[in-house]
Image (cartoon, grey):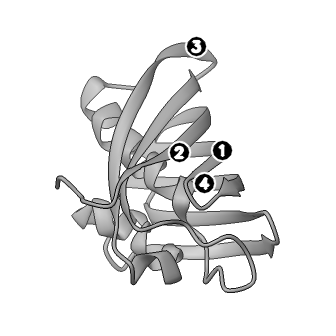
Amino acid sequence: MSKGVLTLAMPVAAVFFLAAPSFAQAIELQPGQWRDVETGTENGEKVPPETFMNCLSPAETKDLIKAFSPEKEVKALRGKCQTLESKLTPSGYSMRVKCGDPEVFGLDVTANYTFTSPQSYTATMKTFVTTAGAPSFLNKKVEGRWVSATCTR
């Protein structure tokens, strides 16, 4: 996969780690600045850890599926994402989301989240990315930590 595609795909993948419907009956994440540290493989090759910053508004902590959809982060995917499966538990969430057009740029993501507190979570994600019909596979683990009540972006 080209470096340009990875630059686009990695932040898109990272946003899925927080995606979940209302947490009224489960842990509700704290609004503010979050740091996501992502580790894992791409096409079977280990890749260096990457860090992404994310901002959650108070409203977004109530509707994370919309707040962290790839549509929010990648303009090219707006209106092109569909949640295929989702399951909420008292301590986590699992989902499968498909976005875009595989002939241009598409994602098929299966993610499992464990919310350990309002200020932390872990997640595993398997993402099938296609760019101009060329496939790539990402197998990632994410550790998300709340940083502060004020967002820098």
The numbered mark at residue 18 is none
Which numbered disc, 1 or 2, marks the residue that appears first in the sequence? Answer: 1
Q: Which residue is mark 1?
A: 122
Q: Which residue is mark 2?
A: 144
Q: CA distance from mark 4 to mark 1?
A: 16 Å
Which numbered disc, 3 or 4, marks the residue that appears first in the sequence? Answer: 3
Closer-to-camera residue (5/130):
5
> As shown in the figure, which amino acid type bears the numbered disc 1?
Thr
Q: How many marks?
A: 4
Neighbours of disc 1 within 10 Å: few (<14), some (14-19), many (20+): many
The numbered mark at residue 109 is 4
> As shown in the figure, which amino acid type bears the numbered disc 3?
Glu
Neighbours of disc 2 within 10 Å: few (<14), some (14-19), many (20+): many
Kindly identify the residue that appears in the image at 54 percent across and 76 percent down: 82
Which numbered disc, 4 or 2, marks the residue that appears first in the sequence? Answer: 4
Q: Nearer the viewer, mark 3 or mark 1?
A: 1
